[in-house]
Amino acid sequence: MSAARAAWAVYRKEVVDALRDRRTLMVVLFSSVLMGPLLLVALSALLASFEASAESRVVYVDGAAHAPGLINFLQRQTRIVKAPPADYEAQLRARKWSDPVLVVPAGFDVAVQRGEVPTIEVVSDSGNAQAQAGAARVQRLLAAYAQERSALTLALRGVATELLEPFEVQERDLASARTRAAQITGMLPFFVIMAVLYGALNAALDTTAGERERGSLEPLLMNPARRGALVLGKWGAVASVAVLIAMLSCFSFIPAQWLLRSDTLQAMFQYGWPEALAFLALLLPFAAAMSALLMAIAIRCKSFKEAQASSTVVLAAVSLLPLVSVFDQRGESPWHLWVPALAQSTLMARVLKGETLGAADGAVPFAVCALLTVAGLMWVARRLNEAAVR
Amino acid sequence: MIVVDAVAKRFAPPSRSLRDALTRRPVQAGVAAVEQVSFSAADACITGLLGPNGAGKTTTLRMLAGLITPDAGRLSVDGIDVAARPREALARMGVLSDARGLYPRLSARENIVYYGALQGLGRDQAEARAELLADMLAFKPLLDRRTEGFSQGERMKIALARALVHDPANIVLDEPTNGLDVTATRSLRESLRFLRTAEGGSKCIVFSTHIMQEVERLCDHVVVVSGGRSVAAGTVDELLAQTGQTDFEEAFVRLAFETAEVREAPGEVLA
């Protein structure tokens, strides 16, 4: 019989078998496919609350009566001054209160006029991220007030204010909106890559180590089909499941966008069909290579459990490799594209930044994945007989 | 027609690890699983390979199925050399091996049709064979159930049907009655007898076992295997006559173990 027909028969059977394993598919679906979009939505909610507090014009001042000058300044900055609740310290600690509190001591204005350098407190809790973010804002306001006061005092004595501020500082941010967003969306490639890996994992182990454990590998090899055809059919099925999971994962970010709570993130995070398709194009060879690699590892193992233990090495490597781009301060190096997982995450990050990928960028990772696939499959085909009889 | 001619297989020792070398563990010797097994199984005949555990029966049958390459000797199926044309030989054989795992998420029918496809049958052809075998082996009600949770006997029937899906002229069974109860064993026996008849296709059937009664009840020809060698062959009556026994178990013990002792300790015999 022709090798192609045998491979097709194996492929069909393995796909049906994998898709009938509903429980595993559901677990993969919930743990890897939905995790990315869910985290994105949760992150956007957090970001939205930060934005809300950044926009809030309320400053909480305890003892506002002691500092009419400061209150006047705050009101001129269009801030609304309010008194905090009595137990604000406890509430800050418990993270129930999300604003810093300005504590003004008695006789503050008088002391300032006398030049006694009184202390004013900005009460916050460094374990309370939102209050901490607000504290920086309040401190900037206080610095501006101090500067205004000293400028006025010196002006009264005939000193030019330029002496106090010999130059002006102006920031110019070169990052585009998408680059800024990439800091937040940078985790997406990781989720997509892991989804592919988990999608392939179960099917790869089941068709190799699982087949050995069940005792169905030996009878399978007693059919007059070429070893290569069997392996090709199995690999095709595993890769197809992995690609299916990859597709679900890539496309799941499109509806996830509609749920984004933060307007800025929504404006910055541009993920549409072109991006999803670019992701998929990068992931196809990766899914193929990972399927072959996992099968090659699992064929040596006598049981599913043993294979799971062995494949954690691959899982760990794939989840850690993309971190190289985080730790490597020199930025992106050419060798990054030669390492599977790292290459895919690097290129996906570029897609998210809005850069267009050329064929040359994809060529190296594609070649590496193709090589890995061929080597893995040849290894599996060679080990098949040995695996069956032991 | 299956001919096995003086096959031998020695398994290499496991490769030495670094730890073995450091602890100076002695080099392990390889295991001679089969030293010299020869027999021929004719068509329309049930040939039994009878031998104690570890005699080399399974290894011999695995060599026949092309899973293991013999170190010496040759095997042929209907004149096709297994070593030279393994896939052609396999197409003429239905092998029920020692391992008979099914796919639990597939139905019995799907399990059988899958093997039909691997044997090169068309879908309709394979479906028809599955129905026919379900009738013959009496498992029709199981056909569309998933094999998860099947009993030992049910599994064996499906595995046997799977091995026979391409209607092979030669049937090789490795300890088929292992784990089966009386009724299942009887029904298997009847199926094999039917397959031997002209109506059943005059199959050449080889099966290995360590159970005397199986052989006595079923086999037309018995090959006694012991210590990796085929030590005697003939009908049950011939073997009884050869050893001068009336009890087949006694005859088997004589043939299997006493010849082995003679071989292992030739000095004593000479003295």
Image (cartoon, coloured by chain):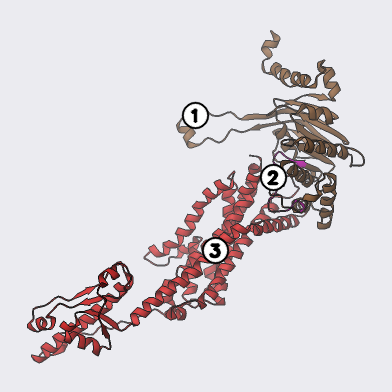
Chain colours: A red, B brown
Question: What's the chain of the residue with tag 3?
Answer: A
Residue B45 location (% of width, % of height): 87, 34
Which residue is tagged 2?
A: B101
Amino acid on which the number 2 mark rests in the picture: Gly
Label placed on residue B89: none
Q: Reply above or below: A166 against B52.
A: below
In terms of sequence position, does the residue under pointer 1 or pointer 2 come before the other? 1
State the residue at coordinates (63%, 62%). Answer: A240
Secondary structure mostly taken by the magenta-highlighted segment of the chain? loop
* Left or right position of A296 against B55: left
Q: Which residue is mark 3?
A: A30
Q: Is residue B97 magenta?
A: yes
Residues in magenta? B95-109
Q: Does the stretch in magenta take in B58?
A: no
Q: Chain of mark 1?
A: B
Q: Residue furthest top?
A: B271
Name the element at disc 1.
Answer: loop
How far from the left and from the top, in percent, is residue A329?
A: 36, 65
Q: Look at label 3 and name its amino acid.
A: Phe
> B188 or A202, which is in the foreground?
B188
Estimate the x, y position of residue B242 in percent, counting from the top left.
83, 18
Q: Is residue B170 above or below residue A324?
A: above
**Mark sitting on residue B25:** 1
Look at the image and tell me whether residue B110 can be seen: yes
